[in-house]
Image (tube, rainbow, N blue to C red):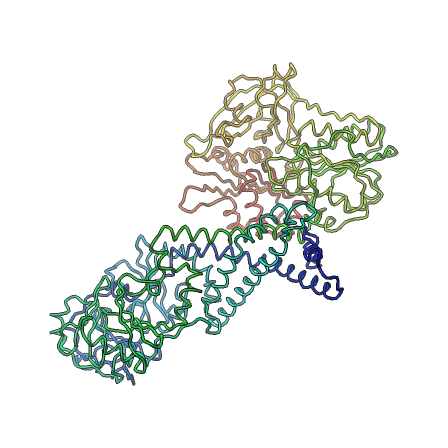
Amino acid sequence: MINLRIFDTCIASPVPSVSEVAGEGARSNGKSRSFGEAFERAILLIHRWIGIFACVLFVTWFISGVILAYVRWPAMDRTERVNVLKPIEWSSVGASPTAALQALQLQDFPKDFRLEMSGGKPVYRAIGWDKRERVATEAQTGTAAIEQPPVSGEAGLAIVREQLSAPAATLETADLERDQWTVTGYFNKHRPFHLVSLNDEAGSKYYVSVATGEIVLDTKRKERFWNWLGAIPHWIYFPIIRKHEGKWTWMIYGLSAAGIFVAISGVWIGIKRVRLSRRYSNGKRVPFSGWLRWHHILGLIGGFFLCMWVISGLLTMYPGGFLEGRSLTKTDFERFRGVSAPRFPRVDFNALGSVAGDARRITFNYMAGVPILVLEYPGASSRVLDARSLKPITYQSPLYRQATEALVPEAKLLSMSWIQDGDEYWHTGFASKKLPVVRAIFDDQVWFHIDPEAGAVIDVMDRTARVDRWTAVGIHDLDWYWLLKKRPLWDFVLLVTIIPGLAISVTALVIGFKRLRKSVEPDLAFEPESFEDSGAEESGANLVHTSTARKAMVVFSSQTGTAEELAEQLRTGLVHARMEVQKRDLAELSPDDIAQCELALFVISTTGEGEPPDKAMAFVRRHMKQPANLVATAYAVIALGDSEYPKYCQFGRQVDAWLMQSKARRLFRTALVDKGEDAAIKTWVQNLEASLERTIHVERNELFSRWNLIDRTCINEGSAGEPILRINLASPEAGHHWLPGDIARLQAGITWDEYALGQRSIVRDYSIASVETEGCISLLVRLARKPDGSIGTGSGWLANAPIGTSMVLRIRSNPGFHPAPGGSPAIFIGNGTGYAGLRAHLMERVAHGSGRNWLVFGERNRTTDFVCSEDIKAFSDAGRLEACDLVFSRDQPVRRYVQDALRERSDNIRHWVEQGAYIFVCGSQQGMAPGVHSALQRALGEEFLQELAETGRYRRDVY
């Protein structure tokens, strides 16, 4: 059923029909037109719903791709591996290269054969043509060699400590098969690994191959962090997926194909939606508005870039070998070397030591049949010697040309060109490539690249590979040498080409989210209509008259008591108008109850981010998923909210939309009341009077009293945040009563004398932090600042008014946050000034010795923001605070909040709730309240937490 609703919603969106798109000249053949319409609709629907998923990928790929352009995947190239080696100890080398080759039982001269130090001793390393790396260590006789056994964890640690001069290094993991940084198939020849941590400031970690004892990879904390944001999401390099090479490859093919379809179909749909001559009925050349219009325009502008980027990304995977150039083969190496047998002349290492100095590695090789030694030094420098005479061989030697010509004996060598800094086909923009390099071009269109400093062929590039450089690789990575040389122009071009595709994807996600929300969320099943900013229509406009109504039901849904208070005032007014009236909480009703009423008046508040009051959630879940049959009921809705929140009066709107869908008769447009605005309420009542054709007196004059400011103390001196003030107010009149959880309503900025003369001001609500027995009303008020830096009206008045000022205040009941039954356990959760709403509860319970109490409180720093320290000590001394969790977010390197403490205490929360505990939450709507709600859902389950809210055991006062 949900899927059907999704598609219904899509079809109903503002998209022109196929006949409109086809234009006036469209052929009227029924079958052709029907097929075209079905085809276009199918493409459209697939584009929309696959597009949501694809655009999540696009956004991920675009953002991670930019990061990847600057932080590459961790790797150690040949130069870096040389840099971590110690100089060769020439006097320790006894076995000859041939003896090592024999010990390794190689049938051919290996692909790579070298000598270096490892663990304080010289070792021969060889990579055979089976891609397996072997190590031969010298025997004690000094003349033979044996194949090295696997390296233990302790030996691997010793290798790192010795080669890197890192005595503080520790073995983190032994025999590690694979992890996030060794997930690729490249490391198969080295598995498993010993992972060694240097314990340095950079967070360096080194991987030692168990098979060879070689350090094959290093990672730093910084590059690991950026790769989690870059390469890993970009390439979907998660070990659980990436370790299955074949499945991972096909997954990438599938995701890329879906992205290509979405991109191309989007461009096709976008072009078809543009009318250059006959315009749409809205007078424009495109049929869309709002986010759809932006998506359409951006798609037309940036669709080409998006298509090219996604297609080129797939092509870099070389599906089916397409655009994949050939690689160097064993034959290429043997032709260049002129030798294939596994032998090498004896080398006088003592004599070589006087020539080679502090070389870190010797590579044994051949060039045109001549044995050569490649001496490698830190910093990527190297020298080539004739292995027989130990004399240097430079690029000017005829050996280079002889060996190069032998690479393609059936073709003619046209040129050998020296490339010092790179060109379009060979540069170090995105890959570690050897420079300088010599390019050999043959008349069969094959290019080879020769390392002149190592006397070795290192790359082959056929025509297909060169096309790939200019197309897939060049387009996807912007890997063009001419542009890379002109940085930061390259960086600017990168952003310019990325932004259109990113913008297309973001607008698509916004549109998709709106449609999905409309389609699958039960409380959003009935989308409210657009309302005017004024809050209500003028009196008498668009009214449905129901003068015969004699009975009415006033339905309220309230979080903090405001809606219930207004509902009572409305009920009283209707009774005085000689109507039979009942007042009911929406949470207690069913659609049948409403259907039996000829007139239902709804006073509906919205809490949090557009949410229903806690007790109303059951009604939403049980009854608002589908329309009811309310055809005999007339209704009107007054919605209370705060326009500072983006989903202003959202629940009131939803109730109105649900009533309309249920065929109830709306008397007049719903009023949106901002922060209890009297004008909007007055207009709504006037509309109700006109509809009922009777006078209704709704008494809105709140009874304020005189309260004197007797004390003001800053209780967070030195805090990094704004000051928190404890404000004490006393009334010269007796008879004021309140309960824990009640609210003080203050008319900010005016004194009692000014109020008595008829002056009125804006009203601010504050949780009462004291109990009656303390003899005064205490408030905890944080100094608020407006966006322009000026002080907030209410907090500024309380902060600066002289002591003794007579203020205008009334106590408002807040039944949704009143105390739990005396013997029940209670969990109190809050942060900052939210402690005010909890303090009164704790004071009352401690004074009466009732129930078990658990406080979870959070602030910035213990030294400056521990605003409840004295109270906690007093509660503890009285033996009435069984548990107390204090969370100071900035007292440790990693920020920690109230919700984190709750997640850690999930078992305790469940235990307390099972024993009948009530949960009270008071504090900031931004951050704390949603985080706490999520943590409680995790601990108790969403349905059970909702049940607690509906039964009054989960009570919130958030602002």
Q: Residue at x 58, y 53 (%)?
A: 508
Give coordinates of residue 618: x percent, y percent: 70, 47
In the image, 507 versus 121, the foreground residue is: 507
Figure check: 97 above or below 260? below
Query: For this rendering, which residue is in front, 228 or 467?
Result: 467
Residue at image point 58% right, 25% down: 777
Q: Is residue 847 left or right of residue 69?
A: right
Determine if residue 439 is in view: yes
Residue 945, above or below 762: below
Residue furthest out toward the right: 548
- Does any portion of residue 366 appear in the rendered image? no
Residue 691 screen position, x and y as percent: 82, 32
Pick the front one: 114 or 121? 114
Describe residue 953's horizontal placement relative to residue 334 as left or right.
Answer: right
In the foreground, 301 or 534: 301
Q: Position of residue 661 (x, y in %)?
A: 77, 47
The quarter holding residue 600 reads top right
Estimate the x, y position of residue 640 in percent, counting from the top left. 68, 35
Give the mark count.
0
Q: Is 62 rendered above or below residue 605? A: below
Quadrant of the rendered structure where residue 197 is? Answer: bottom left
**Left or right placement of residue 315 versus residue 658 in this view:** left
Where the N terminus falls, by quadrant?
A: bottom right
Q: Residue at x 64, y 28 (%)?
A: 738
Q: Quadrant of the C terminus?
A: top right
In this picture, is 477 found above or below 616?
below
